[in-house]
Image (cartoon, rainbow, N blue to C red):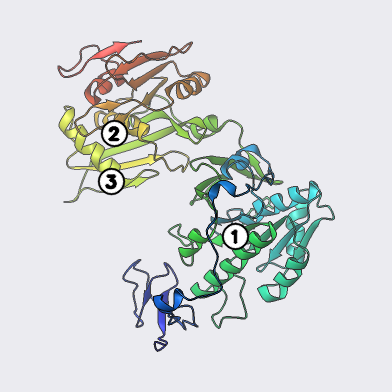
Amino acid sequence: MPRERTLYTCSECGHTEVRWMGRCPQCGAWNSFNEEKPGGLSGSGRSTRSLGAAEDTVEPIALNGVEIDRLPRYHVQPAELDRVLGGGIVPGSIFLLGGAPGVGKSTLLTMLTRDFAAAGQRAVYLSAEESASQVRRRAQRLGEIGDRFLIVDEPCLERVLPGLYRDPPAFLVVDSIQAVYSRELDGIAGSVSQIRFCGGLLADFARATSCAVALVGHVTKDGDLAGPRVLEHMVDAVLYFEPDPRGVVRIIRAFKNRFGATGELAVMEMTQKGLQPVRDVSAMFLAGRLVNEPGSAVTAVQSGSRPFLVEVQALLTPSHYGTPARVVSGVDGRRIALLAAILDRKSRMSTSGRDIFVKVAGGLKVSDPAADLALACAMASSLRNRPLLAETIFLGEVGLTGELRPAENLTPRLKEAAAHGFRKAVVARLPGQSLPRIEGLQVIGVRTLAAAISAAFGLRELPKDAEEEGA
Ligand code: TYD
Ligand code: MG
């Protein structure tokens, strides 16, 4: 057997080293290394030759002959959250809900536990951070509790899991995975090895008993899960509350889902009675917008199954320092650098020597490529200090040569804009592509960024390399 060596694991990212280090070479965190004893997890000393003679083996079988589990999913309220979960909670699955402190993780899972109980299912809330009475106080704010909502406030899994194995509930919440621990290990609750080990125990429990398990996970300042990334691979789905909860709006997104699509997002509001869905997401993201202001453009982003409108804002001002500042929130900074470079090359404007500030209003993160055109037009508008065409939305991906690519799902996006009082749309259009006809909306198809900018300022004459086509 190889000699057991002590390893040092970064508590932020799970990176391991053979010696202690002040700073993690992988994630850059300071003073994050903890000592770990390998404890027989690696190096079993078995050789491939002895594997050939092993007795306790499992034979592969024909996939055709495998029975498919047809356990019905548990549907949850509101419908948006159900969609984020991939169309309900699958029995025997385990999901992780991450989010900053105070964002509403416990509130959301208390609501789910209550829904299970109200549907006649036993549901257990394992609270390792708060006392049973604190959990009751929160649950009471949300309404009727019912007899099937069970609580256990104990962080040691060995004291809780045997009882749950004897009589498994339909749903188990573990609040939080950083606060529970196993006696099998030396490390304190929240250490990488504890999180990994307890995550494994709970995943085994879910599979063995068909109980659906929800884990609460805390995130660090940067929005990463506090603890090892390995937990994300261990679970079936990872849901996150979008960081930066300034107001009452909460956005929940799925980053991974073995049982459904990702990209869906639920927009909720924190109220006196818990989290309530926001019915008109577009109206909420556009609230407070100043119309006819330079630097503002509206686009429709597609998130999962539905589109909604968001405002993007840009401010480009002369820089007073050698290196201009670029401060970007809600979109990838590299995308803004790219759009600025394309603007420089393909329009008669120059962003050089300018500080560039770009943000998505409402704290949303936008990765939809169709938002490119709105971002570029907002930057152009701020550069010229002229507002864009009123009541207009912009849709299209901008390519490196200044060409535009059409947005996917154009019709629903345009309908959403028309429903919110928009009268014009400047959209990317391929040659020969016909544009949808939407009542009350003039759709202007353009092929290049330069043409789009001309249209965005309501100009008639167009640069030579552009062509404009009315719908
Ligand atoms: P909580 O769910 O405890 O957050 P987390 O578990 O993510 O740390 O609740 C967060 C905040 O929400 C807390 O400041 C109280 C507030 N809140 C409401 O506004 N309305 C409610 O109905 C509840 C239960 C909480
Ligand atoms: Mg909590």
Q: Which amino acid does label 1 sit on?
A: Val
Judging depth in this view, the residue of 18 and 25 nearest the camera is 18
Residue underneath mark 3 = 334
- Which quadrant does the N terminus fall into? bottom left
- Mark 3 and 1 residues: CB-CB less than 8 Å, in contact? no
Q: Which of marks 2 and 3 is in front?
A: 3
Helix, strand or loop at mark 1: strand
Within-10-Å neighbours for mark 3: few <14, some 14–19, many 20+: few
Disc number for residue 216 = 1
- Mark 2 and 1 residues: CB-CB less than 8 Å, in contact? no
Judging depth in this view, the residue of 237 and 41 nearest the camera is 41
Helix, strand or loop at mark 3: helix
Residue at 40 percent of width and 81 percent of height? 7
Residue underneath mark 2 = 379
Of labels 3 and 1, earlier in sequence is 1
Helix, strand or loop at mark 2: helix
**Can residue 362 be seen in this snapshot?**
yes
Q: Quadrant of residue 106?
A: bottom right
Within-10-Å neighbours for mark 1: few <14, some 14–19, many 20+: many
In the picture, measured across the screen, residue 118 lies left or right of residue 274, that is right
Q: What residue type is labelled 2?
A: Met
Mark 1 lies within 8 Å of ligand 2 (Cβ measured): yes
Whole-percent x and y of residue 351?
Answer: 20, 37
Compute the Cα span from label 3 to label 1: 32 Å
